[in-house]
Image (cartoon, coloured by chain):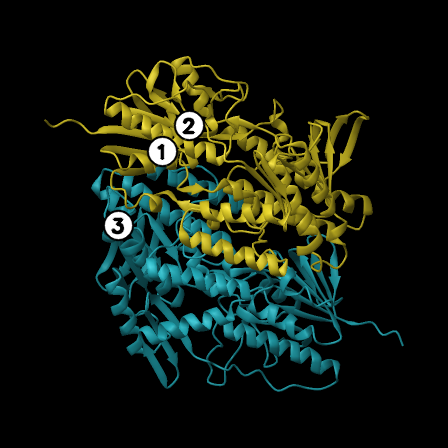
Chain colours: A cyan, B yellow
Amino acid sequence: MAQQTHRVVIVGGGFAGVNAAKALAKLPVSISMVDRRNYHLFQPLLYQVATGGLSPSDIAYPLRAIFKKNRNVEVLLAEVRDLDPDNKVVHLESGSLPYDSLVVATGAGGQYFGSDHWEPFAPSLKTIDDATEIRRRVLLAFEAAERETNLDKQLSWLTFAVIGAGPTGVELAGTLGEIARDTLKRDFRHIQTDRARILLIEGANRVLPTYPADLSLQAERALIRLGVRARTGVKVVNINVNGLEVEGPRGRELLPCRTVLWAAGVKASRLGRILHERTGVELDRAGRVLVDEHLNVPGHPDIYVVGDLAHVKQPDGGMVPGVAPAAMQMGRFAANGIGARLRGQRVKAFVYWDKGSLATIGRNKAVADFGKLRFGGPLAWLAWLFIHLMYLVGFQNRLVVFVQWAFSYLTFNRKARLITGGVVLPDLTQPRQAEEERAEQQTALSRES
Amino acid sequence: MAQQTHRVVIVGGGFAGVNAAKALAKLPVSISMVDRRNYHLFQPLLYQVATGGLSPSDIAYPLRAIFKKNRNVEVLLAEVRDLDPDNKVVHLESGSLPYDSLVVATGAGGQYFGSDHWEPFAPSLKTIDDATEIRRRVLLAFEAAERETNLDKQLSWLTFAVIGAGPTGVELAGTLGEIARDTLKRDFRHIQTDRARILLIEGANRVLPTYPADLSLQAERALIRLGVRARTGVKVVNINVNGLEVEGPRGRELLPCRTVLWAAGVKASRLGRILHERTGVELDRAGRVLVDEHLNVPGHPDIYVVGDLAHVKQPDGGMVPGVAPAAMQMGRFAANGIGARLRGQRVKAFVYWDKGSLATIGRNKAVADFGKLRFGGPLAWLAWLFIHLMYLVGFQNRLVVFVQWAFSYLTFNRKARLITGGVVLPDLTQPRQAEEERAEQQTALSRES
């Protein structure tokens, strides 16, 4: 009679995990949502935090608040140490959680293609702390340029490089262009911020390489008007505190530049490797888990991998892209799969429904690719605005973000331009040395952890 | 003919410094505003950031944006190393600034009355980074309580102590009570957050000791309804990771408690001591500079000290209080003084115009003391709300804060409940050890700096 409730453990509170939990909460199961952060992050707008347009709490929402009405969902602030598929247990840094079904949705981080030592010089944008660190670097670069009297060094502070011209890279570069041309225009007395150079480095031969070629062209034209110079068909061969070295058709070239941002590739999170070790499942080159058509680890119908951590083949041989709508669909699919198994039913294979892609470049400028329908300009920008506002969790966030956007739009201002995180200022007369020390410290730290 | 423009250096971009600069900007002088942070902070609402109600950027505004239209104001992100009154030079960590008039407005920090080793266990609330650190500790305490199975330890995580029952302490304690009783009510599964205990420790024999006695009584009653227990007439004799020890009429007592916040006293910033060493000016016990009736360092009519760093005697023998309206008045007075000197005129002595005091306790609850007119309850709360919104710099901030308050009021939610600043989680099974290590690290850091 007293049958034990089916226990589902979900690891990761991103788009995939939250959507899985929300769908499962309606079923007679008990759910543990494990995340090492206490909030769900609306990652598509993270570049707005990195560039001072929005505050962290505008795009992050407490996980406990999301599930407060779902009494069968328990939120655990914890880090997963290991998985034990044989005994159906998840090991946390303290204690362990038994499960009947497991959903792994821990996403991906920055991928430096074997050059992890570039990370201190070229941070990637995946977390709130990344975003506030990038914001700190960008704002300090303008401060340093204002104080610098050597013109070469000043230009190097006023040069910003973004590596990778996918949607995130294009959004970052475009916003940096807007900041330099509009937001900071009258803020400084010794530099003209609109003379800042923003380089957008891309290995493929056009920006937004996954978009149709005509939209790439539109995007590149819009970027040029914002002062962004796209350098396509070039490969990054080195990054250090003085700048970056690229290799292209014209040979090697050194680009002096004090601020480099990384938007070039993703690497699956650590749990992919743990799954590989414990179940033998195959991983792709980026460390993603090759799941079957039901998003299960092959041979383990009780383990689902969803979101950016999953490598899912599409009928045309391509891979389901690592975007928010795909993660949400996978999360809900896994929840349905668990429900069906409980009822003794089978479900059809997962099919990704591509609703189209949108990338914004700046004020009024975006490109939209809805299959046959594709367009750029203000209409695409409005579509982008509308869709992002609708998907923001929490009505209050939506309204606050809308108010901030409306003001930014009307006034060209970006109010969240705060340099936080310690009061240590770079020694602006000896910037190179100070930066190198900081980089060394960071390398030392990452070695320790 | 080519007379050099009068150069004013203002150190500190708080209420006093910003008001001085804004008033001076209308005169034919050139102004350098030096601050080690790039923003002006609306400190009266900092407790709202510490308790997750507002985001840092809601109450901080970039200094450069404040002065963008004042072409004769230059903002310098820099730390002052030393002052040289004989040669009229301010030494920065790199370079130096000559001045004709100097305004020192660097404010005050937390004062631990000779027990600085308590600081790691009982942070004070003066900067944005303090506020996000306190927010982190408060939220992690509830997380730790949820995971803790030992009931004594759980209770210790659910006990919060606020030291000092002035306006800041009362506001912090009241807001913690609201968080426990309303905001987090349905967020956890293993603890009842409304059983959290909030202790408000005060050495005087009533809360809000600078207010009339009847308002203190009203405030204490309102606090009790929020679950805050005021312990008046007791002195803190020790603080460590396990809690605090107090001494009162009933002797010594140990209060087990994992989260202690410090709101007990202020200590003038480092520049007070530098002024003392360079000019011989007297300091009071808290390190404030005893200025003359023109807010000058005696014998130095070109050096003004304004805001929380200044000790200004009132006609009745008391001291002008360290509140925002006083700082704003002093800043404008110094600007007028400089203007008068340029025209060869003299100004009257500084007189503080006390517009009254307001302290909020929570939803609908506040006390107002406008001299003869004093009252508590919803009307005082509305007055508090209105005045604070009006003084917030920047129209956009005002509107965003209003929207967030309206939502918090209607929904009992506080959206900025983010645990940021590194992904390191405390080991919740061994909390004592982890906390001690963190405290040791912090002590080591403060020793280095």
Q: How far is disc 1 from disc 3 in space, using C-alphas?
A: 27 Å
Circle 2 is placed at which residue position?
B306
User: Circle 1: is it few (<14), some (14-19), or many (20+) Cα within 10 Å?
Assistant: many
Q: How far is disc 3 from disc 2 in space, using C-alphas?
A: 33 Å
Instruction: Depth check: give the residue in front, B69 or B110.
Output: B69
Dot 3 falls on a residue whose secondary structure is helix
> Which mark is in front, 3 or 2?
2
Pointer 2 with pointer 1, Cβ within 8 A: yes
Name the amino acid, label 2. Val
Pointer 3 with pointer 2, Cβ within 8 A: no
Instruction: Depth check: give the residue in front, A266 or B375.
Output: B375
Q: Chain of mark 3?
A: A
User: Measured from the top left, where is residue A303 in percent x and y?
Assistant: 67, 72
Name the amino acid, label 1. Ala
Residue B320, placed above or below residue A209: above
Count of marks, rendered view: 3
Q: Is residue B164 left or right of residue B308?
A: right
User: Measured from the top left, where is residue A396 in percent x and y?
Assistant: 54, 63
> Which mark is in front, 1 or 3?
1
User: Measured from the top left, where is residue A356 in percent x and y?
Assistant: 43, 79
User: Circle 3: is it few (<14), some (14-19), or many (20+) Cα within 10 Å?
Assistant: many
Dot 2 falls on a residue whose secondary structure is loop
Q: Chain of mark 2?
A: B
| Quadrant of the rendered image containing residue B17 | top left
Name the amino acid, label 3. Thr
Circle 1 is placed at which residue position?
B20
Instruction: Depth check: give the residue in front, A243 or B279.
Output: B279
Hey, which residue is sitting farthest front in the picture? B372
Circle 3 is placed at which residue position?
A193
Q: Quadrant of the N terminus of chain B?
A: top left
